[in-house]
Image: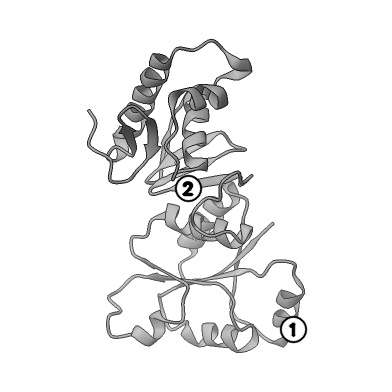
Amino acid sequence: MPKVLIFTEDPQLFLLLRHLLAVEGFEAELSAGIDADIATEIESERAPPVLLLDKTGDRFAEFLRFEEFVPGIPSVLLARADMRDETEIYDRFDLILKWPFEPLVLLRFLQQQRTGLNPQNEPGSTQTVLTYYDLLLHRPQFRVFRDGHNIDLTPLQFRLLETLMEKPEVVWNRQDLIDVVWVNGANVEPRTVDIHIGHLRRALADYGPNLIRTVHARGYALDQSAEPWP
């Protein structure tokens, strides 16, 4: 299980992060510092842990020791205050989350570290988690989140969104969607695809703008700049 080492003086924050990360398959460990023995243990692990630093109190000394013992460790900063005058500190981290931070962004970053993939989904991939804009689709749990909110979808709507998210750069025509989404070559009319796309748009609309673009005479594609609907 991938590990996240958390530096924080806020026990409530640690407990919340531990629960959130456990749900997504990550192990959270409260860390007080590092020495040569801990560094050796980290280096022996198959996948390096991710360091998460909560900017409360003076904890940068411990972080610098991590850099000294384990250079290049993936790192995240929870910035609770304005740090415009601390550009050098900003540059040391792979991800900066300003308070109050968005958990979905943190989960995306951790998933990328776990899979070694780029932020964009690779065509034909077997990722357990797909992301696009503010959407996160978790295949094993059959769950979809938008901007951190759980979205209830029917199995068909889930498969439809999953197909669009697998190849967000592709404009899917209706017949191709029928072939992929509907089971056992079901006899489905193209108009049926339009109806279910409408249902999917409606389900996603509670927490953000339309993300499904209609391409006249072609089909549908994900597009964060799609026209408002309806």
The location of residue 221, given as percent across then percent down, is 39, 37
Q: Which numbered disc covers residue 131? A: 2
Residue receiving disc 1:
37
User: Looking at the rendering, which quadrant does residue 111 occupy?
Assistant: bottom right
Q: Quadrant of the N terminus?
A: bottom right
Q: Is residue 104 above or below residue 220?
A: below
> In terms of secondary structure, where does tag 2 sit?
strand
Q: Is residue 40 left or right of residue 69?
A: right
Q: Amino acid at mark 1?
A: Asp
Nearer to me, 143 or 26: 143
User: Looking at the rendering, which quadrant does residue 77 occupy?
Assistant: bottom left
Which of marks 1 and 2 precedes in the sequence?
1
Is the residue marked by circle 1 packed among few (<14), some (14-19), or many (20+) residues within 10 Å?
few
The location of residue 188, given as percent across then percent down, is 49, 12
Q: Is residue 27 visible?
A: no
Q: Is residue 182 visible?
A: yes
> In terms of secondary structure, where does tag 1 sit?
helix
| Residue depicted at 33% across the width and 60% down the height | 100
Q: Amino acid at mark 2?
A: Thr
Q: Nearer the viewer, mark 2 or mark 1?
A: 2
Q: Is residue 99 above or below residue 193?
A: below
| Residue depicted at 38% across the width and 32% down the height | 220
Q: Is residue 28 above or below residue 186?
A: below
- Marks 2 and 1 sit apart, C-alpha to C-alpha, by 37 Å
